[in-house]
Amino acid sequence: MAVCLEMKGLRKVYKKGEIDVEALRGIDLIIERGEFISIMGPSGSGKTTLLNIIGCLDVPTAGEVIYDGTPLHHLKENELSEYRKNNIGFIFQSYNLIPVLTVLENVELPMVIDRKLSQEERTKRAMELIERVGLKGMESRYPRELSGGQEQRVAIARALVKHPLVVLADEPTANLDSKTAEEVIEIMRHMNEVEGTTFVFSTHDPRVEKHARRIIILQDGRIARDERR
């Protein structure tokens, strides 16, 4: 497999008053295209910090992040934001849908902001994703008219609509019941296989762990275990 993302010697230090808190302590990690990875660990292990750095939402104190051969440490803030917009999809536990937009409009939104495709092309791509996540016929509904599981399906479609290099999912099943969580995980696994998109989860959920093909356990800001299945 081709390398999607590489991290070399990642360290992240936060200031807490006069004290330095080291959230990451030298992370070396290679993620290949098409992987389905669960990052796990207790609270304070560095999961959220690592996901934020992978998602270009934060920058490391030391070390390198290299996406698809592009080192990010030299990018300015606006360039980092542009790279994130074009290459990274996000799925959150709170869905983060726009309540005044329909399902179709929510899925189309990243492409509307991008302004690279025509309306016809945007609608075609969005409808393809809506059908793949099992919401065909619901494209005119608003988030308030959907269940939690359906909202998360919309969020998955939105995250995938621009063919991102990687999709980052932060506790995507936290607000879902067991049956719905399993359905949502299966959809993401299917999209991983069909689209070839790399998925990286930060989660405590053993249901996600069960489906992951690679599990990375963090402890005290270090990789304690890296297991492929």
Image (tube, rainbow, N blue to C red):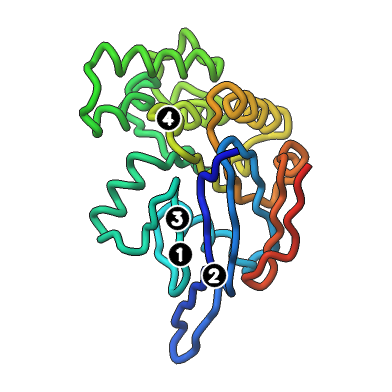
Q: Which numbered dot is residue 66? A: 3
Amino acid type at mark 3: Ile
Mark earlier in primary sequence (4, 2): 2
**What secondary structure is found at the residue carrying circle 2?**
strand
Amino acid type at mark 1: Glu
Q: Are marks 3 and 1 in contact (CB under 8 Å)?
A: yes
Residues under labels 4 and 2: Cα distance? 28 Å
**What secondary structure is found at the residue carrying circle 3?**
strand
| Along the line of sight, the residue nearer the viewer: 107 or 54 | 54
**Which residue position is annotated with label 2?**
9
**Which residue position is annotated with label 1?**
64
The correct choice, above or below, for 107 with respect to 216 in the image is: above
**What secondary structure is found at the residue carrying circle 4?**
loop
Q: Position of residue 178 (x, y in %)?
A: 73, 34
Residues under labels 4 and 1: Cα distance? 24 Å
**Which residue position is annotated with label 4?**
163
Q: Quadrant of the C terminus?
A: top right
